[in-house]
Image (spheres, rainbow, N blue to C red):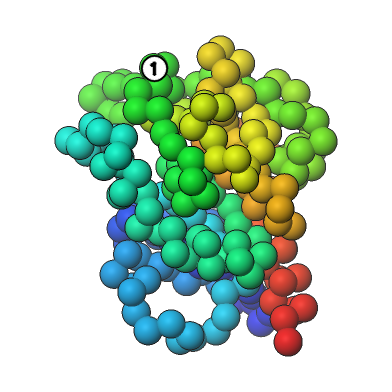
Amino acid sequence: MIPDAPVIGVTAESAEQATVYARVIERCGGAPRVLLPEIQRAEPGTGEPIGGLLVCGRQYADSPERQCGTRQMQGTVESPIIMAALDNDLPVLCIGQGMHTLNLAMGGGLVEDISGHAVVKQDGEAVSSYHRIFISPGSKLAAVVGSGGFVRVNSRHGQGVRHAQKSSMLMASAYSAEDGVIEALESTRHRWVIAVQFHPERRTELPPHFYRLFEVLVQRGRERTASSP
């Protein structure tokens, strides 16, 4: 492990889900600390301080529960750790359902059924669908990936966020070109908080510069750790 590797907390629903993202953090020079729901209830203050947070979110697509209220309650499982990270102005990156989790934690809601964005069946296997999004020039997301404008991304969600459900504490920085569904959120109240609906960890499905989201998270985590007393 790199000697000055910053500790990046990784919230996940399961160890299997966490492993994918933990490996990404390691490749980018960070030291992942997996935060499963049962581990989050462990005694606070143990281990090295976290320098950043990666929120993978929870997988709602196969849940039999369809009421938005139930989903919102499920989405708040990670809320305490997200709010603690925000209170300490840690760098935070939310991926996929993690974008929903951030929006819920900050008082927003969800649209239950977003057509045309879910995975599709191909030879019996669930694979990503694709669509174009527009990234707002001048946003933090645009600064990370190199530019704003239109780009093709993957899509693996059945729920989503429109402006009516967006937290008032977050700014939309990317939209689906087809239907205006929000594809990225970021905080204007914190130094670096970005949430994206697509999945940059699936490297073959997106332009390579989107992987910089993880690289910059680790970089910001390193800076945050170095500046801590």
221 or 186: which is nearer to us? 186
Farthest residue to the top: give it: 178
Count residues near mark 1 (Cα–Cα under 10 Å), then give few for <14, some for 14-19, many for 20+.
few
Residue located at (44% from left, 58% from top): 79
Q: Mark 1 points at which residue?
A: 115
With respect to residue 131, does 39 lie above or below? Answer: below
Whether residue 52 is visible, yes or no, is no
Residue located at (41% from left, 49% from top): 57
68 or 202: which is nearer to us? 68
Residue located at (57% from left, 80% from top): 49
Residue located at (65% from left, 61% from top): 91
Residue 82, percent from left and from top: 50, 60
Quarter of the picture holding the C terminus: bottom right
Image quadrant in which you'd find residue 159: top left
With respect to residue 23, does 132 lie above or below? Answer: above
With respect to residue 21, does 211 lie above or below? Answer: above
User: Total label count?
Assistant: 1
The amino acid marked with disc number 1 is Ser
Where disc 1 sits, the SS reads loop
Whether residue 1 is visible, yes or no, is yes
Residue 106, percent from left and from top: 52, 49
Quarter of the picture holding the N terminus: bottom right
Image quadrant in which you'd find residue 137: top right
Residue 121, percent from left and from top: 29, 22
Image quadrant in which you'd find residue 60: top left
213 or 172: which is nearer to us? 172
Residue 56, percent from left and from top: 45, 51
Q: In this view, does 73 lie to the left or right of 108?
A: left
